[in-house]
Amino acid sequence: MLAAAVADPEADAVSWAECAAASESLTGQVFPALPSSSMLIELEPPPLLQATASTATPARAGARRRNSTRNTLQNRFATSAGPPIIDGMTLTVTTDPAQISSLLARLLAADPVRATVLGSIVAEVRAGTAPEAWCAVRQGTDALVVRSHRQFPALFTSGWDGSDLDAAIALVRELPDLIGVSGPVETVDAAVAALADRAPSHRTGMRLFRLDQLTPPRDVPGEARAASADDRDLLVDWYAAFSEEAHAMLRDPTQFVDRALATGRVWLWWDDGRPVSLAARRAPESGSARIGPVYTPPALRGHGYASAVTAAATADILDIGAIPVLFTDLANPTSNKIYQLLGYYPVEDRAQISFR
């Protein structure tokens, strides 16, 4: 295996060039260049290189030199800042915005519904509003774990298993101010078990829904209106209330409200001259747009307002030609029921764990 840690791109330039030349001479394939802010913890060489290096006589000297290069770089990485190298890992870790955007965009294009949260991260990375974005990807697969901000959990995609999952969890453990993990249920459970020293404070079972055809509710008094900057204070209060009730990890509701007003749209349901419920929809990414939050103050619940305002936000998404998606809390039977009455149907379940 070839291993490199590009903490100092200029110092490693010759060693990486030697590895690339060896690969090209044996396989005819040009070895990929690495962004300066990436660290390739362990990279599997092309299969032909791996098979030929042990049998082709002309390659033996090059193989010995590559082994020396590997040992030198591995020792250098072991003494540098950052998480320690883990033997046998095939993970690439990067904080390079362009590379993170490219990795996530590929998964988003392949499945814009299941990758809806990745779409939100891509938008932030491209806008330059996620300066601490971090990602680890399993080489040769679609499995990755990503975090856009310290105030969000580390998000695992599907495709993790075995020693690579263990390695990914070990990397996540080293993230500063880790507040939680989310993703496929089995993966999250494995992460929580491995992070046993971090006591979970709350577990949320989530279900992803999508909609193809809207069935709006009938006989709900009032009308939908798009929120404006004049509604900002109300929205901040309601976002904060939603966050506390739903354990949504919104440490600063103001920035989420400002982003929603600037890049998406927030719908308010008005009845009897006052706003009674809200539903926000994000800007579409690769053909899907996510609704959330949906919030009605406790004293105003039971009148169908949440269904009506969610239908308005859903119709807005359909009007711009995107697929509406949303997440529900599996512990809330009311929300799971009303969304299905609108035409939403389940896609998959996930879990989110927050740490104290």
Image (cartoon, rainbow, N blue to C red):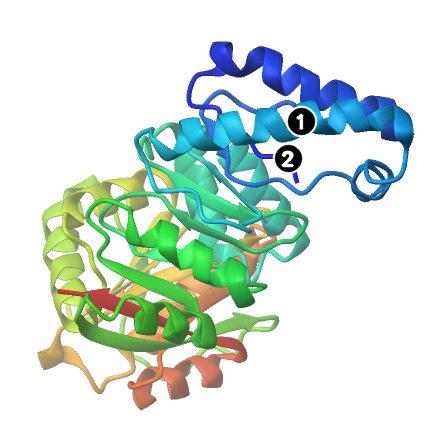
In the rendered image, residue 322, in percent from the top left (x then y), is placed at: 58, 55
* For residue 255, side relative to residue 171 (left or right): left
Image vertical order of residue 61 relative to residue 304, above or below? above
Can residue 161 be seen here? The reply is: no
In front: 57, or 260? Answer: 57
In the rendered image, residue 74, in percent from the top left (x then y), is placed at: 48, 33
Q: How far separated are the C-alphas under marks 1 and 2? A: 7 Å
Type of the residue with mark 2:
Leu
In front: 96, or 139? Answer: 139
Tell me, yes or no, whether the two marked residues, 1 and 2, touch with CB atoms within 8 Å. Answer: yes
Residue designated by label 1: 66
Q: Look at 54% across and 80% down and name the residue there.
A: 345
Secondary structure state at the residue bearing disc 1: helix
In the rendered image, residue 188, in percent from the top left (x then y), is placed at: 39, 70
Give the position of the C terminus as an image quadrant.
bottom left
* For residue 122, side relative to residue 43 (left or right): left
Q: Look at 52% across and 36% down and name the residue there.
A: 101
Image vertical order of residue 127 relative to residue 192, above or below? above
Q: Tell me where residue 240 sits by quadrant.
A: bottom left
Give the position of the N terminus as an image quadrant.
top right
Residue designated by label 2: 2
Image vertical order of residue 119 relative to residue 115, above or below? above
Secondary structure state at the residue bearing disc 2: loop
Type of the residue with mark 1:
Arg
In the rendered image, residue 56, in percent from the top left (x then y), is placed at: 90, 33
Q: Look at 24% across and 47% down and name the residue there.
A: 256
In front: 241, or 176? Answer: 176
Q: Tell me where residue 185 sits by quadrant.
A: bottom left
Along the polypeptide, which appears first: circle 1 or circle 2? 2
